[in-house]
Amino acid sequence: MQVTSFCAIVSIMKVTHSQLSKDAKRSSCPIACVLDILGDKWTLIVVRDLFFGKTTYSEFLASEENIPTNLLAERLKRLTSAGVVERIQYQDRPKRYAYHLTEKGQDLHHVLVALVGWGNKYIPETISLKEIEKRVTIGGSDSKGDDLLK
């Protein structure tokens, strides 16, 4: 009887722990919380590409940084579950999705501009925001990338 109760408690604890670990924060520090979503070498590259008009998986893969497919899929999932990106199906067979920044994602504008400014100031031979636009933008100057330059 005690073994059954113990197993039931452990089972409940696992469910509770898995639910908590999805939403749990490692800290109340906003920097730590943001880094949990954006803090790796690929995620902000995906966000950058979204600002410059890329929306499909193949367009993200075409970026010069060469993000591995498994990491791209994981980053898009993470950004979607965090509400930074929305995924919209545009084809049924095979299923294909387009990704777009939500309002929450659009609010990263100043973060990216600040990172470019810091990089230009302290890392020799980094390119300007205008040059990034030329290299990354899909569809010319009518793209969302203009929003990043404002």
Image: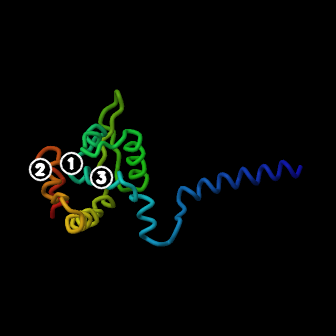
Q: Comparing marks 1 and 3, which lies closer to the viewer? A: 3
Farthest residue toward the right? 1
Q: Which residue shows up at 40% across the image and 59% down it? A: 39
Q: Which residue shows up at 67% across the image and 52% down it? A: 14
What amino acid type should be assigned to the residue bearing mark 2?
Answer: Asp
Say which mark, if any, is on residue 45.
Answer: 3
Farthest residue toward the left? 141
Say which mark, if any, is on residue 100.
Answer: none
Residue tagged 2: 142
Q: Which residue shows up at 40% across the image and 44% down it? A: 71
The image shows residue 129 at horizontal and vertical percentages of 16, 59
Q: Nearer the viewer, residue 88 or 37?
A: 37
The image shows residue 143 at horizontal and vertical percentages of 15, 50
What amino acid type should be assigned to the residue bearing mark 3?
Answer: Ile
Q: Secondary structure at mark 3?
A: helix
Residue tagged 1: 53
User: Looking at the image, is mark 3 or mark 2 earlier in the sequence?
Assistant: 3
